[in-house]
Image: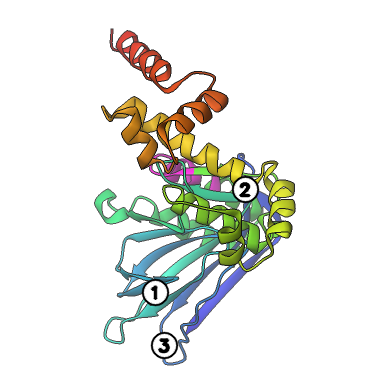
Amino acid sequence: MESIRYDVKQPVFSRQGVWLMYCAISRYDSSWSSVLHSHAHAELFYVTRGRGMLQIVDTTLPLQPGDCFLINPYVMHTELSSPQEPLEYIVIGLNRVVFHGSDGGHPRYVLLDDRANQRVLLPYFQDILRELSSEQPDYLEVCASILDVLLLKLGRRVGMDVSREDTARISSGCAEAKRLIDEHFQEEITLDWLAQQAGISKYYLSRTFHTYFSISPMQYLCQRRIHEARHLLTTTDHSQDAIAILCGFSSPSYFSQAFKRVAGLNPSEYRRRQRGADKKAAH
């Protein structure tokens, strides 16, 4: 694997506070070694040539030119190339950011098909790579400006949470527990199960999760379920009992109690107000 990486020599931040760490270009050759690995920061991949596969934990996804992948911190991944069509991609490392989907959760990855958009994202990847490799006057300021535009472009199609904290300071166990909650909130989840899956003790998980996220794991689980319930109450005609089940609550009565505690309204009042607001906006 031929890879040329340019590390940013001093901190470069977008206006939102996202930290640009490095940019690299990688090309397949006979030395390519595909090993699952993870980082304490997010990565942006843009496939420029060839074909291959992206393996994320136990999921394998095809790669072709124009694919743009956003991979969240602490997610195990690796790239595999087709021998017939050698894979080439540009990767950007970003700290202090986590990407999320339309449902508010933090998935392992987000795939953007930039082929459908005439590869509008590619020039920003290429420009950052070019600036870091050439080190022309004011190149760091130029990189910060390019990153601003790239993130704004990405923000049209995917959500992102920007943190003032270095994501490397968040323990991998806590990050994994949070990801598990985001991915499995509809299922029955216990603190014991989270700790076992994350490979840490439940006492350490409770303490450090609260330190990093200012909320306990079980409180975050409840908030995550309420977030989904708000979405379903606003956008569907599902009954409250059905929504309670879809969001992972053990009973409709507990769902109603938890919803009112978090949202300040019971589910039916919340739905009525939201739909009333939508009607006013339509007029």
The 10 Å Cα crowd at callout 3, few under 14, some 14 to 19, many 20 or more, is: some
Location of mark 2 (residue) = 217
Point 37% across, 12% down: residue? 277
Q: In the rendered image, which residue does mark 1 sit on? A: 88
Q: How is the image coloured?
A: rainbow
Q: What is the spatial separation of the Cα atoms under label 1 and label 3, in whole angstroms?
A: 10 Å
Give the mark nearest the N terminus, 1 or 3: 3
Q: Find numbered disc 3 in the image and state the secondary structure of the residue it sits on.
A: loop
The stretch of residues the image draws in magenta is 147-159
Taking the image as drawn, is residue 10 in sight? no
In the rendered structure, which disc, 1 or 2, sits on the residue that comes first in sequence?
1
Q: CA distance from mark 2 to mark 3?
A: 44 Å
Residue lying furthest bottom: 30
Disc 3 marks which residue?
Answer: 29
In the rendering, at what x and y percent does residue 106 appear?
49, 50
Say whether residue 1 is left or right of residue 244.
Answer: right
Q: In this image, 168 relative to 158: left or right?
A: right
Residue 283 among magenta residues: no
Does residue 78 appear anywhere in the picture?
A: yes
User: Mark 2: which amino acid?
Assistant: Pro
